[in-house]
Amino acid sequence: MIRNLAAAAAMLVAFAAPPTQAQSTDATRTLHQLFDEEWERGLRENPVNASYQGDTRYNDRWSDVSLTAIQASEAADRAALARIRAIDRNALSPAEQLNYDTFLWLQEKSVERQKFRTWLQPLGHQGGVQTLDGVAEVLPFATTKDYRDWLKRMDALPVLVDQTIALMREGVKAGSMPPKVLMQRVPRQIAAQIVDDPTQSPFYGAFKKFRDGVPQADRAGLQAEAQRVIRDRVVPAYRTLQTYFNNEYLPKTRDSIAAAALPNGKAYYDYLAGYYTTTDLTADQIHALGLKEVARIRAAMEKIKTEVGFKGSLPEFFTFLRTDPRFFEKTPEALLTHYRDISKRIDPELVKAFRIIPRQPYGVRPIPDNIAPDTTTAYYQAGASDGSRAGFYYVNLFKPEVRPTWEMMPLSLHEAVPGHHFQFARSLELPDAPMFRRTAYFVAYSEGWGLYAEQLGFDMGLYDDPYDRMGQLAYEMWRAVRLVVDTGMHAKGWSRERAIAFFKDNAPKTDQDIVNEIDRYIGDPGQALAYKVGQLKISELRARTKAQLGERFDVRAFNDEVLSTGSVPLQALERHIDAWIAASKG
């Protein structure tokens, strides 16, 4: 007797007749038609994302974030979920089943998210309508049309600001408000957009220098039009936002920091933990895992402290690492040069850990000054999907005196190569994969890979300096601490101060970074859980592969195989690696 319904279903599938070639072809064609149509819908609905992908068709507009448009988009998501469920998965090849499973997971999560109405909080302290000038970073500005598209976008900004304010008003009515401690950072960001001289606007940067593809006869007119649009449209729009935000919205933001304090907040945090980690781990399980990792990494840090001959306690060693002048560059220019030097030191060693090197290049850029004080130490911006723009590793040059050099090696391995740049660039090279797979970003896989890539510095011989190895431990500790403080603040009632203190007690990162990080976790609940969970899974799969393949294990082949799937849920990655192990043994 079959007592388990899943087992019963599996037996029915096992005894069912295999699909015919015609059935398989029809199912595959229907599947890819859905993929193509949904990809195009996504670009239409999110023109900024289209710009980041290198698709210039929508460079003259912003997203429509009116309530009507949001409702239409949510209805389209529900329809897409129904369409994917109507396709016979058993009629698909294994490769197409991976496409099917990945798309299904994404659509189910998108529809599940709808009940939490996340659009009620349309801007945050790390970005929103107040920082849209940053879109110019990825635009080509190679022709007169590129500039005219940007002018049209600037001209349309008041509509987007009004729509954003309307969503914020809905959030006030619904009691869905962001934490005050974060929103207190936003007035400065809005104020940076309000200028008396249009040529000093962040939106004007592209008009200060033209490329050869823009005729000389067009340039003065473009500059004059940009100044007019900034003066008559952009600045007044931001004055409207400033008045509403400072006088009405900010005073009503909440004093609490926990996601659980929001309407339906506990369910929302549970959803976010599952969405970001692509697992069913509970907040308590993740918290306990974090505490276990913190203890393990502290023991390794004690060994480094002994190796370098430091005589004080571990907290005193942290203070030394945070404050000794030998670990800091004196100017932003020197700091940028150091980052670029480290990147070039990594590049020739990549062949020790990989057989496949992606074709897309990458560069190192400073984080824009207007957002640097409120953002992280570094981040990666993927290259355009059509190859028209390289990937870029953005580094924070604000206050060089709080940017220690011992963190630069693991940070560069994570954000540039072989971390995010390899992961994104290899995904773009996936043969025959639909675009949503080639550009996918599952946080547990992608950030787990980034954290795993920090450890590949050992395979590449890059951690000969004990302080660099301390930096690697510090960065691993940073991600372990996240498991504790994120669940602590959002599910266990921790205060912001307690989270900051726990972070500072267990990691040598500087106070500036620690505060920014804690505020990031408050503003983006659950996202920070994915890094360590993903890295632990990839490391577990590596150990499993090595144990089963023995002398035939090749770290280069394993790393290439992890990247061969593109960004997928961790369960899908595990199934793929297990199948690869079995094939390798055979």
Image: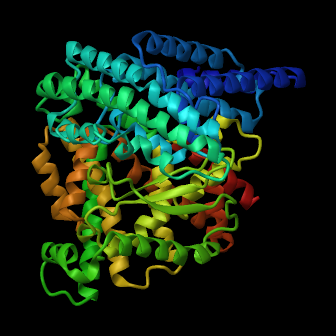
Residue at the (30%, 76%) spot, across then down = 329
361 vs 106: above or below: below
* Residue 398, horizontal then vertical, whole percent: 29, 61
Residue at the (19%, 25%) spot, across then down = 243
Given residues 286 and 395, the one toward you in this image is 395
- When asked about the image quadrant of residue 347, the answer is bottom right
* Residue 501, horizontal then vertical, whole percent: 12, 56
* In the image, farthest residue toward the right: 21
The answer to whether any part of residue 537 appears in the image is no
- When asked about the image quadrant of residue 488, the answer is top left
194 vs 446: above or below: above
> Is residue 353 rendered to the left or right of residue 468?
right
Image quadrant holding the C terminus, namely: bottom right
> Is residue 383 rendered to the left or right of residue 274?
right
Total numbered circles: 0
Residue at the (69%, 68%) spot, across then down = 355
* Residue 133, horizontal then vertical, whole percent: 41, 40
The answer to whether any part of residue 133 appears in the image is yes
